[in-house]
Image (cartoon, grey):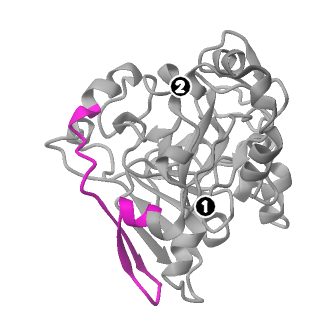
Amino acid sequence: MPRITLINFSWLVPVNRLRALASDGITPEWVYRSRRRFLAAAGAGAMTIVAGAAKAVARYDGAPRLAMDETLSPFEEVSSYNNFYEYSTDKKAIRQLAENLRPYPWQVEVKGDVANPRNFGVAELKSLFGVEERIYRLRCVEGWSAVIPWLGVPLGRVLGACSPLARAKYVRFVGPCDPSRFYGQRDRRLPWPYTEGLTIEEATHPLTLLATGMYGKTLPNQNGAPVRLVVPWKYGYKSLKSVVSIELRAERPETFWTRVSPEEYSFSANVDPDVPHPRWSQAREIRLGEMRKRPTLPFNGYAPEVAHLYAGVAATERR
């Protein structure tokens, strides 16, 4: 496959479909870190390959566009302010605590109501299903947000390779459980391991990603290495880190936060600025690295792509 060199026009095209690119064909990390420096260095010469680059990055049909003033959140902010309750409730401590994660080797098991259960290594996921670059908004239920360039494989392709049975209506995700390394799991009051769930339609939607990297490099431990779920129209607690197993099933699964506090954390967890959390408003959010709040968008800005999934669904069930 010929090497493709890309200009990072992420503020124009937020979802970039890259099929099975080698790592040196993906926008390098230094470009993400300093877009202005990159454009200044590229100068007029960069414009000569704009048409080719746009063609290379525009292969995801239905790519949602970010507003023209959207910019990527700083890597240092995204990689040092993390929720990873398996380690701690202290967001600033996760980066150091997660040094013992040991993400390789790693297996992701796909099981349950499938005709072809499989165990996938991370390298196998990449080689079988192709690495794509997706730039998504992330909105935490706590009121902060980010714009992150992910690398990963569409979950729908992975599930399709395992041949879901007709009775499979839901997908359950499970994270690691080892209190000797995950210090937060020593708190037995919480229902470890961390679990989450989606409907089969949500799980197989083209936007749903199993992320294996971000900002052009391997996924950092504190951000959910070596593979995490990313569902960009839902609150961040749905995007489980360090996925160990994926189970297809007929019944809706219990999930971690709905077991802890069902009145505060719903199963659907679709971003909705009109529905407050019991303890705070969801109408506005603050981006990592910024000072001012901005309005929160319905479905985190992805309503044109996903609202049809909830047509006819009661409001209390889709929020």
Please give left or right for residue 242 compared with residue 18 in the image. Answer: left
Q: Residue at x 77, y 64 (%)?
A: 309
Asked if residue 74 is among those painted magenta in the image, a careful observer would answer: no
- Residue closest to the far top: 291
Q: What is the secondary structure assignment of the residue under circle 2?
A: helix
Please give left or right for residue 100 compared with residue 79 in the image. Answer: left
Location of residue 271 by image quarter: top right
Residue 30, disc? 2
Q: Position of residue 9 (x, y in %)?
A: 74, 34
Q: Position of residue 171 (x, y in %)?
A: 52, 69
Mark closer to the chain start, 1 or 2: 1
Numbered range of the magenta stretch? 98-126
- Which is more toward the observer, 229 or 187? 229
Q: Position of residue 261 (x, y in %)?
A: 49, 44
**Residue type indicated by callout 2:** Trp
Asked if residue 121 is among those painted magenta in the image, a careful observer would answer: yes
Count of numbered circles in the view:
2
**Residue type indicated by callout 1:** Arg
- Binning the other alpha carbons within 10 Å of mark 1 as few (below 14), some (14 to 19) or many (20 upward) gives some
Please give left or right for residue 277 compared with residue 257 in the image. Answer: right
State the residue position of label 1.
19
Q: Residue at x 29, y 35 (%)?
A: 87
